[in-house]
Amino acid sequence: NNKDYENSLKFLTDLSQKYGQNVNILTQAYTNFIASSNSTNLSLKQRQDIYASIIKAGSALTLSNDSIEGSLRAVSQMFSKGNISAEELRGQLGERLPGSFGIMAKALGVNEKQLNKMLEQGQVLAEDALPKFAKALEEVYGDKAQSNLKTIGGAWNVFVDDFYCWSTCWRIVVFPGKSAIFAEGFNLLCMIF
């Protein structure tokens, strides 16, 4: 419904602005993330907390948009399958979000060797483990997350997002139906630079 859509859009815009992430990438990944976690017993708030913890960790580590998107895709796959596999945790998530395996072990109160055995036996359920993982990520990276705004990549993402919002509002409100004028202006700017 419209209210859920507006709340989700505000959630994503806030994440983008606070942590210097591209709102378009966040939006695409969020759609898949929420869809893959719909069958769980987790509330929307819990799922958003998991999502936000990945964004914050990626921002603290100044990961690329692609790495953050890949991390979110890995967690979405974990939700889709129900059980977390070693390949998803070590390979897909761990390659993009360094330290994930150790953080997951800590979150579950086991060492890495025990976690590996649990994963092999299919004992790690996404619905149980990922909220704990999100809290552990928050403990490790939460206070460092806004540091991404001090990087060129983070500042650029905020600039592009703000410019897109401004140009869309300007185009719709001030010059409805005049998209071609904007396109010509941007093409001229590109030719100059």
Image (spheres, helix red, strand yellow):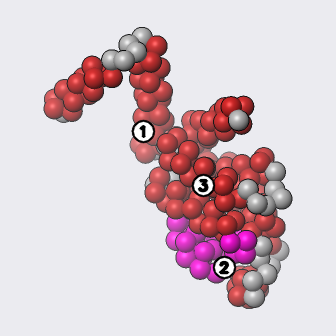
Q: Are marks 3 and 1 in contact (CB under 8 Å)?
A: no
Determine which of the numbered discs, if any, sits on residue 89 in the image: none
Residue 100 horizontal/vertical position (percent): 64, 69
Please state if 27 lies on the left or on the right of 39 as rendered: left
Q: Which residue is mark 3?
A: 32
x 77%, y 48%: residue: 44
Q: CA distance from mark 3 to mark 1?
A: 25 Å
- Label 2, secondary structure: give it: loop
Q: Amino acid at mark 2?
A: Ser
Residue 108 horizontal/vertical position (percent): 80, 72
Q: CA distance from mark 3 to mark 2?
A: 19 Å
Q: Nearer the viewer, mark 1 or mark 2?
A: 2
- Going from N to C along the chain, the mark reached first, 3 or 2, is 3
Q: Nearer the viewer, mark 3 or mark 1?
A: 3
- Going from N to C along the chain, the mark reached first, 1 or 2, is 2
Q: Are marks 1 and 2 in contact (CB under 8 Å)?
A: no
Q: Amino acid at mark 1?
A: Trp
Q: Assign the N terminus to one quadrant of the image.
A: top right
Q: Which residue is mark 2?
A: 85
Q: Dot 1: few (<14), some (14–19), or many (≥20) neighbours within 10 Å?
A: some
Please state if 110 lies on the left or on the right of 10 as rendered: right
| Residue 66 visible in image | yes
Instruction: Check if residue 101 falls in the magenta segment.
Output: yes
Q: Which residue is mark 1?
A: 156
Please state if 62 lies on the left or on the right of 43 as rendered: left
Q: Amino acid at mark 3?
A: Asn
- Label 3, secondary structure: give it: helix
From which residue to which does the magenta span run?
81-104
- Going from N to C along the chain, the mark reached first, 3 or 1, is 3
Q: Dot 3: few (<14), some (14–19), or many (≥20) neighbours within 10 Å?
A: some
Instruction: Check if residue 162 falls in the magenta segment.
Output: no
